[in-house]
Image (cartoon, grey):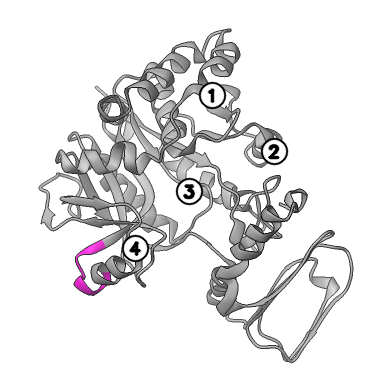
């Protein structure tokens, strides 16, 4: 009989554009394909390298069809049958559920771990310790989320309340979840932060594939039946035709709503605290902060460093247009120069980049997105 660790299969959902990182991050080159940490590796490649040592089997990636070439170039180890290409966006429930269904069709006792492609996590050794605890907890029949200690009353994340420790051998940090709230309003988020009883849901799930699919069957039966139909054909010559016919019919919903919240209400969710540094690299302020913590320097330069001249300047400058960028006497500035767009803002206003993206959509500037 396999141990829980031997039953573990990692999945990387690689979707989303990262509109607050425009004009670097776009539909054709989303943030998970970019090197935003100066390490010479994209966020996707970093995610793969974190997960590969945890599994004796393959890592699966779920992404859009338009990213197939870029993903396989960045992860040449990826087998064709473990690259799930979405013909169109159907949100996280369809993506993660299909991966679970495919993996379960190959191993009915599989434990699946879903980890977003665009997060920065350190140290890797501590991340591995936490995931191994999550795997042991999942083996007891739980959907396990990894909770991150909140640093602000963010409305961008779900919140987890897990007041009761679980007695799981090999998982001393595991706790039983009694409520799971997806993206509360600002006032509620502030209450949660002040209480000290909640962690952020960072979108990392570890669970038996069969349990994930059972909860999906209860809440979204049509979505459940659709992903099972695709999975049944996945390792056959009918894969493409069944995918083409079935994928557009799948319900568009988030995994949090379809599985996590109802599973928590049923007592089937546990949490392991994420005792590592975590960032979802949501905007240019986060990029600057992460690089500053790593290098100790007040100015981060991405792209062609030889094209940048900066004097008495702090913040972040990205030069990708093949021309000189000169910035003098600016504090906490954000300058992003690409071939067809120039962004100038401040770190404190980095979140507002999404307002510019909304304006571009409204006024027909979609070719820039």
Please tell me whether residue 324 is drawn above or below residue 119 in the rendered image.
below
Label 4–label 1 contact, CB within 8 A: no
State which mark lies toward you, 4 or 2.
4
Please name the residue that numbered disc 3 is placed on: 50
Percent from the top left, x then y, of residue 92? 45, 39
- Res. 327 image quadrant: bottom right
In whole angstroms, how far apart are the C-alphas of marks 4 and 3? 33 Å
* Label 4 packing within 10 angstroms: few (<14), some (14-19), many (20+): few
Foreground residue among 255 and 80: 255
Please name the residue that numbered disc 1 is placed on: 248
- Res. 39 image quadrant: bottom right
* Label 1 packing within 10 angstroms: few (<14), some (14-19), many (20+): some
Residue 78 on the magenta segment: no
In whole angstroms, how far apart are the C-alphas of marks 4 and 1? 31 Å
Please tell me whether residue 93 is drawn above or below residue 168 in the rendered image.
above
Please name the residue that numbered disc 2 is placed on: 73
The residue at 53%/62% (across/down) is: 281
In whole angstroms, how far apart are the C-alphas of marks 4 and 2? 40 Å
* SS assignment at label 3: helix
In whole angstroms, how far apart are the C-alphas of marks 2 and 3? 18 Å
In whole angstroms, how far apart are the C-alphas of marks 1 and 2? 27 Å
* SS assignment at label 2: helix
Question: Range of the magenta residues?
Answer: 193-198
Exactly how many numbered labels are in the figure?
4
State which mark lies toward you, 4 or 3.
4
Residue 197 on the magenta segment: yes
Label ID, residue 185 = 4
């Amino acid at each position: 009989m396999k141990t829980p660790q031997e039953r573990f299969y990692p999945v990387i959902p690689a979707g989303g554009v990262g509109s607050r990182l425009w004009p670097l991050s776009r539909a054709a080159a989303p943030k998970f394909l970019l090197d935003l940490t100066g390490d010479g590796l994209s966020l996707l490649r970093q995610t793969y390298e974190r997960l590969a040592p945890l599994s004796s089997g393959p890592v699966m990636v779920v992404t859009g069809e338009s990213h197939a070439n870029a993903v396989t170039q960045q992860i040449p180890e990826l087998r064709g049958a473990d690259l799930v290409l979405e013909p169109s966006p159907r949100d996280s429930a369809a993506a993660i559920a299909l991966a679970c269904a495919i993996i379960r069709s190959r191993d009915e006792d599989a434990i699946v771990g879903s980890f977003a492609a665009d997060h920065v996590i350190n140290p890797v050794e501590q991340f591995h310790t936490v995931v191994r605890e999550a795997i042991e907890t999942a083996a007891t029949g739980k959907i396990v989320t990894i909770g991150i200690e909140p640093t602000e009353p963010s409305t961008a994340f779900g919140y987890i309340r897990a007041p009761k420790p679980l007695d799981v051998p090999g998982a001393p940090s595991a706790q039983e979840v009694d409520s799971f709230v997806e993206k509360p309003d600002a006032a509620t988020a502030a209450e949660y932060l002040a209480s000290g009883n909640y962690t952020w849901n960072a979108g990392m799930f570890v669970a038996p594939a069969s349990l994930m699919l059972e909860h999906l069957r209860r809440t979204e039966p049509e979505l459940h039946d659709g992903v099972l139909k695709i999975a049944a054909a996945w390792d056959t010559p009918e894969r493409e035709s069944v995918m083409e016919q079935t994928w557009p019919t799948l319900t568009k919903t988030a995994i949090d709503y379809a599985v996590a919240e109802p599973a928590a209400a049923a007592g089937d969710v546990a949490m392991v605290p994420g005792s590592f540094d975590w960032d979802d690299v949501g905007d240019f302020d986060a990029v600057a902060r992460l690089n500053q913590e790593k290098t100790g320097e007040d100015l981060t330069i991405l792209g062609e460093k030889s094209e940048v001249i900066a004097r008495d300047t702090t913040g972040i400058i990205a030069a990708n247009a093949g021309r000189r960028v000169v910035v003098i006497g600016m504090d906490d500035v954000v300058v992003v120069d690409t071939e067809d767009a120039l962004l100038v803002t401040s770190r404190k206003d980095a979140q507002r980049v999404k307002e510019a993206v909304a304006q571009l959509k409204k006024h027909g500037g979609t070719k820039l997105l």
